[in-house]
Every structure is written in structure tokens, then in C-alpha cells.
């Protein structure tokens, strides 16, 4: 089976530089030192994105993963994933976090999906400032990824950076208007809505351009009223959204852990137990993403 991971964070050197610049007095050297001293189980990345890309390719090869969508995980780091994809054009798709308040499409050459984090940057999906992002995507094939639900960014906490995210901007229902205005733009909501499973399903039921990514440990299942396990989550998502609009992802991010095999194993087991057909599984594990973002 071909496996394409729709959700891998590319924690580049530049990513840490930008994070460090967000806290007065913090430098990249201090970040490196902190990571080493605190024995954070995280390796500090190589300076060149191409070297980090090589490290990812070695790890993907080890697990038999064909491709991964690499997410530049802070605004203004898109050059890192573009460089990674230039080094390995057959292995990576390029996603980039953007802040629509500092929207600069010129820097996004080669980016396939703009990633919005409304609760992180405190704007509503009803605000006119998100329109240019959808305009850009409509000239694609490109996608818009919108993080909804609970957001925690582990690395920010580890580095002592503020993480004052505003949950009021995190409901997938707020995407309805944009999804209707731009029916040709695929919109990806990660982690099955990260706590807004019901709302994500409602939206996907109404809008054929809505996609759900399956990534992470899906710890949000704890918020559900009824006891829910991954198998039931997939069952419900398959019933409402169908097999063509689910995108497998892991939410892998750092080394030495690298590609998060356990997430794959858990999801593959759940789908196996649900007796999902090989064709549907192939869609979820890779074909769906490559269909909406053809090479
Ligand atoms: Zn993620």
C-alpha cells in the first residue's frame, strides 16, 4: 500500500529562529542550549533545510512511507519546506502556516496548502482578511488547512513562549461560509476537528469540499460525552464523510522520534477491524491527498 502522510511538522532551524525572536532576550543559541540541557528528547535541527529533509527521507524510507506533507509551522518559514521539496520533489508536499494579517502570497511559490490557525492568531473565519487566502487557493490546485478545536503547541511550552490561544475562533462551523463561497477549494480540518467532531461532521456533510485529517493521538476523544474509541470515530466519519475525504496523517514533528509509526499502526488497525475495503483504505492512506493536490 502506498502511504502518504498528510500532516508532518517540519521543525526547521528557521522555525526555531522565528520562535526565539518572539520572546525578548531569547536567542537561537539559548534555544539550542535549552534543548540540550533540558534533555528534551528533541534534537536541535541541522541548519540547512535540505539536511533536515534528508533526515526525514531516511526515516520515511525506513517505514516505507512514500510521501509526506511537510508543514512550515510558523509564519514566514515557508522557504524551509520549499527547500526541502526542492531537494526531494517526489517525497514532499509543501504546506505552510500563514497569518492572514501578514498575508504575502509572493513568498508562497510552490506551497500547496496554506494553514490557518484562527485561534492562534485571533481572527474569525468570517473576517474578510481570510478571503485572499481562499482566492490564492482557488488559483491552485491548492488547499486551505484550518486548525479547529483544541490547540496545544508543545514546543512553545518547552521554550517558555506564550501560548494564549483564543478558543472562540476554533469552531469548524465558522468555515461554512468560506466553504460555500469557494466550493472548488479543498478545505482540510485536522484531527477530525480536535474536539469538534460533531461540528466537523456537520460541515463535511454539507460541503463536499471539506476534508478531515486523521492525525495525532486524537486525545480529543476524551471530551466526547459517550466513550469513543478510534474505531468508532472512523466508523462515524466513514458513514458521514465517506472514504474519499479522509486523509491519513500522523502529526509527526521532531527527531529522534521521527515518523510516528504508532499512529499509523493504530489507525490501520482500526480500519482493518472495521473491514474497510483495500480501495477505501488506499484512498485514506494516500490517494485522496494526491487527488486533491496532484503532483
Ligand atoms: Zn499538527
Image: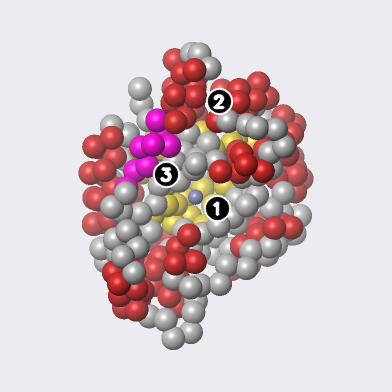
Dot 1 falls on a residue whose secondary structure is: strand
Q: Quadrant of residue 118?
A: bottom right
Question: How many tags in the picture?
Answer: 3
Q: Which residue is mark 1?
A: 115
- The reply to whether the C-beta atoms of the residues labelled 1 and 2 are less than 8 Å apart is no
Residues at marks 2 and 3, CA–CA distance in whole angstroms: 24 Å
Query: Considering only vertical position in the picture, is 118 above or below 157?
Result: above
Q: Residues within 10 Å of mark 3 (few under 14, many from 20)?
A: many
Viewer can see residue 111:
no
* Mark 2 or 3: the one toward you: 2
Between 180 and 194, the one nearer to me in the picture: 194
Q: Which residue is mark 3?
A: 69
Residue 194 percent coordinates (x, y): 61, 45
Residue 225 percent coordinates (x, y): 72, 37
**In the rendered structure, which disc, 1 or 2, sits on the residue that comes first in sequence?**
1
**In the rendered structure, which disc, 3 or 1, sits on the residue that comes first in sequence?**
3
Residues at marks 3 and 1, CA–CA distance in whole angstroms: 12 Å
**In the rendered structure, which disc, 2 or 3, sits on the residue that comes first in sequence?**
3
Which residue range is magenta in the image? 258-265
Image quarter where the C terminus lies is top left
Q: Residues within 10 Å of mark 2 (few under 14, many from 20)?
A: some
Q: Which residue is mark 2?
A: 231
Amino acid at each position: 500500500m502506498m502511504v502518504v502522510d498528510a500532516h508532518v511538522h517540519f521543525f526547521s532551524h528557521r522555525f526555531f529562529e522565528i520562535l526565539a525572536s518572539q520572546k525578548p532576550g531569547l536567542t537561537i543559541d539559548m534555544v539550542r542550549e535549552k534543548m540540550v540541557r533540558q534533555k528534551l528528547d528533541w534534537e536541535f535541527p541541522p541548519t540547512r533545510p535540505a539536511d533536515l529533509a534528508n533526515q526525514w527521507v531516511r526515516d520515511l524510507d525506513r517505514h516505507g512511507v512514500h510521501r509526506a506533507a511537510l508543514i512550515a509551522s510558523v509564519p514566514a518559514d515557508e522557504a524551509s519546506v520549499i527547500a526541502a521539496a526542492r531537494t526531494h520533489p517526489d517525497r514532499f508536499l509543501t504546506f505552510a502556516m500563514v497569518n492572514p494579517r501578514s498575508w504575502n502570497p509572493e513568498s508562497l511559490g510552490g506551497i500547496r496548502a496554506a494553514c490557518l490557525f484562527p485561534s492562534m492568531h485571533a481572527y474569525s473565519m468570517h473576517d474578510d482578511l481570510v478571503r485572499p487566502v481562499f482566492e490564492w487557493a482557488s488559483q491552485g490546485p491548492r488547499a486551505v488547512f484550518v486548525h479547529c478545536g483544541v490547540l496545544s503547541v508543545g514546543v512553545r511550552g518547552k521554550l517558555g513562549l506564550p501560548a494564549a490561544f483564543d478558543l472562540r475562533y476554533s469552531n469548524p462551523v465558522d468555515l461554512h461560509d468560506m466553504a460555500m463561497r469557494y466550493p472548488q477549494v479543498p478545505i482540510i480540518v485536522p484531527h477530525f476537528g480536535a474536539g469538534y467532531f460533531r461540528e466537523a461532521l456537520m460541515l463535511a456533510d454539507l460541503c463536499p469540499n471539506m476534508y478531515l485529517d486523521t492525525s495525532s493521538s486524537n486525545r480529543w476523544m476524551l471530551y466526547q460525552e459517550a466513550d469513543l474509541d478510534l474505531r468508532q470515530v472512523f466508523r462515524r466519519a466513514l458513514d458521514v464523510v465517506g472514504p474519499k475525504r479522509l486523509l491519513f496523517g500522523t502529526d509527526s514533528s521532531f527527531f529522534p522520534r521521527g515518523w510516528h509509526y504508532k499512529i499509523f499502526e493504530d489507525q490501520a488497525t482500526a480500519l482493518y477491524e472495521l473491514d474497510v475495503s483495500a480501495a477505501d483504505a488506499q484512498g485514506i492512506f494516500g490517494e485522496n491527498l494526491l487527488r486533491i493536490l496532484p503532483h
